[in-house]
Image (tube, rainbow, N blue to C red):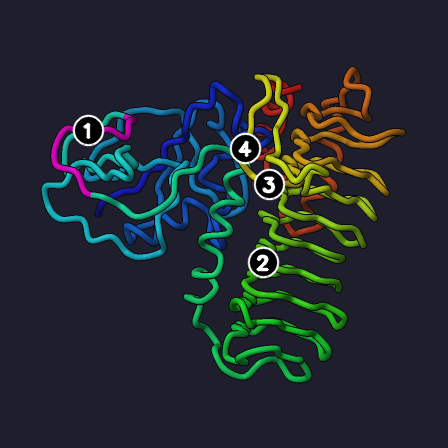
Amino acid sequence: MTQLVLLEPEDPQGRWHPFGGVRPISELRAGAWRIRERWEQAVGVGASAIMGSTVAGFVDVDCPPVVAPHPVAGPVIIAASDFAPDAGRLAIPSGITQLVSHGRPVAQVVAGGTGSPTLVGTGPAMEVPGLWLSGAFSLLDVLEQFLGVDCEAFSAAEGEPPAGALVLGDAERVRNASAGVEPGVVFDVRDGCVAIMPGAEVRSGTRIEGPCWIGEGARVLGGFVRRSVIGPRAVVRGEVSNSIFTGYCNKAHEGFVGHSVLGHWVNLGALTTTSNLKNTYGSVRLDTPHGPFETGRQFLGSLIGDHARTAIGTMLGTGTIVGAGANVFGDGRPPKWIPPFAWGLDGRKETSEEGFLTVARRVLPRRNVTVTPAHEAWLTSLYRRLA
C-alpha cells in the first residue's frame, strides 16, 4: 500500500508565526479539515508520518508521528504541508512522478525504491486543484474558499433540524450528526450549510450563520457564530466571525473574535476582543521579529499560538500575533507582536518553564487528554527552543 508523508515547509521569513515550529503546518485547518486530512482524502490513505526538522517529536491528539526529514521507501507520496488540495479524490495515473499546482511541485510520487524528502520528482507531472498557503494569515483565505464546500459535502444525518430550532432557509442544510442542540437555537443557512459533528453541544441563545462547522465534542454556549470553524472540544461563547478555532481552545465568555486563527489550548479571558479592520480600511500589516510584511487582507484579526492566554478585558489590535505560551495581561494595549512565553506586556519577562508545564498539566486533562511523558518532553523542548 502507498504511504503518505507530509513535508513541512521552511519558513525563513517567519510567515507562519505563531504556529511555525510549534505545531506542524499540516495540523492546521484549511477550511473544515486539517491540511493533512485534505491530503488523506485526496489520495485515499492515512498519513504515516509528518517530516519537519523544527517540529520533530511533536505530540498531540490524533496526530501521526512527527520526525526529522529522512529518505523513505516507496511506494510513497511525499506531499506539501502548505498546500491544501480540493476535497475531491485524485486519480493518479501510473507513471506520474510529480503532482504540481500553478507551476509548483506539491508532491513527489515514488513508485518504488527510496524517495528523498523533497517535493520534486524527475518524470511526468499531473496538475492538482487546490490552494497554496503563504503563511498563517492565508488560512483565512482558504477558509473563505473551502468552508462552504466542506459543509455542503457533509451529508451525514441530512434532513430534519433539531427539535425546537428555528431555521432560516432550507432545513436540509442543517447537517446534525447526533449532536445535542437545545430548543431555541437559530440556524441561518441561506448562505451555506451548518455541519455539526457528533458529541457537539449547541445551547439555547445561539445563532449560527452558515457556512459553519462545529467539531466533534465542541460546545457553543450562546451568541452569534458565523462563517467559522469551531474545532473539536473547543468552547465558544459570544460573537465569532470568519475565524478558525483549531481545537481544544476556550472562549467561554462574551467578547468579539473576528478573522482570527486560534491554536490548541488557547484560553481567552472574558471580554477579550480582536480588532479585524483598520480605521483606514486598508491592508493589514503583520509585525514579526523577521520584519513587517503586508498580508494583502483588509480583514485580519489575531493569530494566537498554542497554550497562549489572555486576561479579562484584553483588547487585541488588528493583525496581532500572540506567541505560543504567552500570558497576555497588564495595563495598556498589547503590542502587535507578543513573543512566545511572554509574561505580561513589557516584553522582558517570560513565563517560567515549570510554570508553563504546570499549567499544561492542569489544562489538558480538562479536555480528557492525558499528559504522557512524550507529550511533556515535547512541551519542554518547545519551551527551551522558543523562550
Tell me, yes or no, whether the highlighted magenta stretch contains residue 124. yes
Q: Label 2 to label 4, Cα distance in Å?
A: 21 Å
The mark found on residue 295 in the picture is 4
Q: Secondary structure at mark 2?
A: loop
Circle 2: residue type: Arg
Mark nearest the camera among 1 and 3 is 3
The quadrant of the rendering that contains the C terminus is top right
State the residue at coordinates (56%, 71%).
189
Q: Position of residue 223 (x, y in %)?
A: 75, 63
Mark nearest the camera among 4 and 3 is 3
Asked if residue 144 lies left or right of residue 309, the reply is left
Q: Secondary structure at mark 4?
A: loop
Circles 1 and 3, Cβ within 8 Å, touching? The answer is no
**Pointer 1: what residue?**
114
Circle 1: residue type: Thr
Q: Secondary structure at mark 1?
A: strand
Mark 1 and mark 3 lie on one chain; the one further toward the N terminus is 1
Mark 2 and mark 3 lie on one chain; the one further toward the N terminus is 2
Q: Secondary structure at mark 3?
A: loop
The mark found on residue 298 in the picture is 3
